[in-house]
Structure formats: structure tokens, C-alpha cells
Image (cartoon, helix red, strand yellow):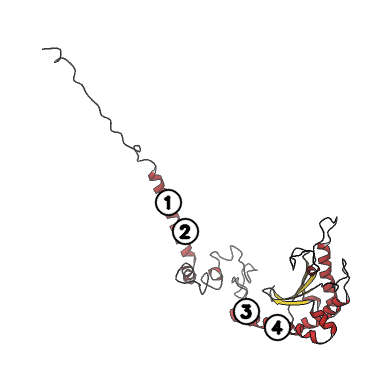
């Protein structure tokens, strides 16, 4: 035998490389996290469904129904969740009418609304609109009574907003409501106060008085706008009460300085003004 026959056999090993590692990478972790999230959402949904009534669930379903652009009832009742909390009133406080006691009666139960049904609300709104129109008509009719009334009409504008009927009266060139830079009312303002006290007697609603001033040059050491606007609003309140207006009807007196100018020219005397607001109920 030759040396070739005595040689050891040659063994070749081939290694098989598995891409991504022995556990197929971390893709399974993402899938598991998605599964756990879905299960958590599912159990939360089951808990919420168990905590609401059929009427509330119907309201929620209507809210998410894309075929209904405006829901007739939002939240499944007169308020959110029909005015009921998903918890007992013994456990948490509720907002809305009532709920002031530990165990309120049915009449005092929080309902998440204004405490009036829609018919009462519509009736009250219509009544306020009627009274506001009467007052506006009375104010506009003052212009034909005398020269003084015509002069007053030039200083007054009215508008109806969500807050109520706003009667705004303001300075004109050479016809200020107050002695310039003071809280001393001019005779014109006294006449306006007397007239408004009489006209606002057509209603029983509460009122608010707001004071505004023009801006002053910034180089002043002491800017008077805040004190002046507040003091002028208080002076108007006092004038009306002196003319027989019921003090109990005054709900608030505020000064807004020069923060809400009526015209863009903030230094204009047109921004020296007062607002008397006949408030809607609950404002």
C-alpha cells in the first residue's frame, strides 16, 4: 500500500446560519404588546358598558354614528351621561343643579342642566327678548321728547347679546359724560342715569355696570385708567340709586380700564364709556 491509502479522510463541516437569531428577533414582543393593549381596551369597554344604562349607551352610539350629523340628545340624556355620573353621588360630587347635600332629594338631584325644562327655558328667553325690545324702543323713542333727550340719544347705542341687553353711553367731542380726568358727572350723565333708571324699571332682571376709559400716554408716571374706569362705574351706580333704582338689582360693578377699546384709536375719547347691562336670568 502506498502512503495515499494511509491518509486520514478529510471531513468538511458546513454551518447553517439562521438569519434573525434563534428566536426570530423581537417581532413577537411587538405583537404581544399589541395584544395586551387590545385586551386592556376591551376590558375597559366592558366596564364602561356595565356602568351605563341602555339610554346612555344609545346616546353614545348616536354620537359616534357618522350618518347622524347632529345628535338629538348628546350623551344619552338631558346632560352628559343623562345627568348621572358613572359613580354614585355618595362617592363623588356632581356638577349641575342640586347635589348640594350628601343624599339629595329627587328635586335637588344634579341633572347636568340649568334646572329648567326646555319649555320653561324657551318661555323665559322669549320673555326677556320681549322686555329687551320694549326697553330698546323706549330708548329710541326718547329722541323726540325734548332737545335734552335728542342730545342723550347721540350718546347711546344698544345691542342684545348672550349676556343680556347692553346699553352703552359714551363721550363725544366737547360733550363728555364726566368732567375730564375726574369722576365728577356732567349734567348730561345725570339725565342719562335718571332716564335709564326709569326705563330699566320695565324689568326686574339684575344689572351690571362696566366702566371703560381711553388710553393715556405711556410716559405718565401713574396711569389712571384702572382707578378711573372703576370709580366712574361706581359713580353711575350711585346716580341710578339716587334716582330710585333698586340697589339689590345691581349684581356687579366693574372697571376694564383701556383693555377693551370701542375704536382702534385707543387715545380717542370715544373709548370713555359706560355699559349698563340688563342681565339674562342666571348671569
Q: Nearer the viewer, mark 1 or mark 4?
A: 4
Left/right placement of residue 106 relative to residue 62 reads: right
Q: Nearer the viewer, mark 4 or mark 2?
A: 4
Marking on residue 121: 3
Percent coordinates x, y for residue 165 in the rendering: 71, 77
Mark 3 nearby-residue class (10 Å; few <14, some 14–19, many ≥20): few
* Mark earlier in primary sequence (4, 3): 3
* Mark earlier in primary sequence (1, 3): 1
Instruction: Examine the rendering and report whether any part of residue 45 can be seen.
Output: yes
Which residue is denoted by mark 1 in the rendering? Answer: 36
Measuring 74% from the left and 83% from the top, which residue is drawn there? Answer: 135
**Secondary structure under badge 1?**
helix
The C terminus - image quarter: bottom right
Marking on residue 133: 4
Which residue is denoted by mark 2 in the rendering? Answer: 44
Q: CA distance from mark 1 to mark 2?
A: 12 Å
* Mark earlier in primary sequence (2, 3): 2
**Is residue 224 shown above or below 245?**
above
Percent coordinates x, y for residue 103 in the rendering: 61, 69
Amino acid at each position: 500500500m502506498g502512503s495515499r491509502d494511509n491518509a486520514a479522510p478529510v471531513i468538511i463541516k458546513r454551518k447553517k446560519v439562521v438569519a434573525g437569531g434563534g428566536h426570530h428577533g423581537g417581532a413577537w414582543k411587538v405583537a404581544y404588546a399589541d395584544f395586551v393593549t387590545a385586551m386592556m381596551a376591551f376590558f375597559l369597554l366592558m366596564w364602561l358598558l356595565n356602568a351605563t344604562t341602555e339610554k346612555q349607551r344609545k346616546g353614545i352610539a348616536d354620537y359616534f354614528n357618522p350618518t347622524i350629523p347632529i345628535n338629538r340628545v348628546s350623551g344619552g340624556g338631558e346632560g352628559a351621561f343623562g345627568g348621572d355620573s358613572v359613580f354614585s353621588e355618595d362617592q363623588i360630587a356632581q356638577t349641575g343643579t342640586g347635589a348640594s347635600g350628601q343624599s339629595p332629594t329627587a328635586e335637588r338631584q344634579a341633572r347636568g342642566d340649568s334646572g329648567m325644562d326646555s319649555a320653561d327655558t324657551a318661555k323665559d328667553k322669549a320673555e326677556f327678548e320681549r322686555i329687551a325690545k320694549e326697553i330698546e324702543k323706549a330708548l329710541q323713542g326718547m329722541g323726540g321728547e325734548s332737545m335734552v333727550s335728542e342730545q342723550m340719544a347721540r350718546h347711546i347705542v344698544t345691542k342684545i347679546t348672550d349676556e343680556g341687553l347692553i346699553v352703552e353711553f359714551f363721550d363725544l367731542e366737547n360733550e363728555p359724560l364726566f368732567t375730564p380726568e375726574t369722576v365728577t358727572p356732567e349734567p348730561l350723565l345725570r339725565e342719562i342715569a335718571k332716564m335709564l333708571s326709569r326705563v330699566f324699571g320695565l324689568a326686574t332682571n339684575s344689572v351690571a355696570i362696566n366702566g371703560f376709559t381711553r388710553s393715556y400716554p405711556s410716559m405718565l408716571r401713574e396711569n389712571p385708567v384702572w382707578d378711573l374706569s372703576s370709580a366712574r362705574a361706581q359713580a353711575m351706580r350711585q346716580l341710578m340709586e339716587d334716582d330710585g333704582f333698586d340697589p339689590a338689582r345691581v349684581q356687579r360693578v366693574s372697571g376694564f380700564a383701556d383693555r377693551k377699546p370701542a375704536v382702534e384709536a385707543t387715545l380717542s375719547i370715544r373709548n370713555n364709556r359706560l355699559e349698563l347691562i340688563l342681565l339674562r336670568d342666571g348671569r
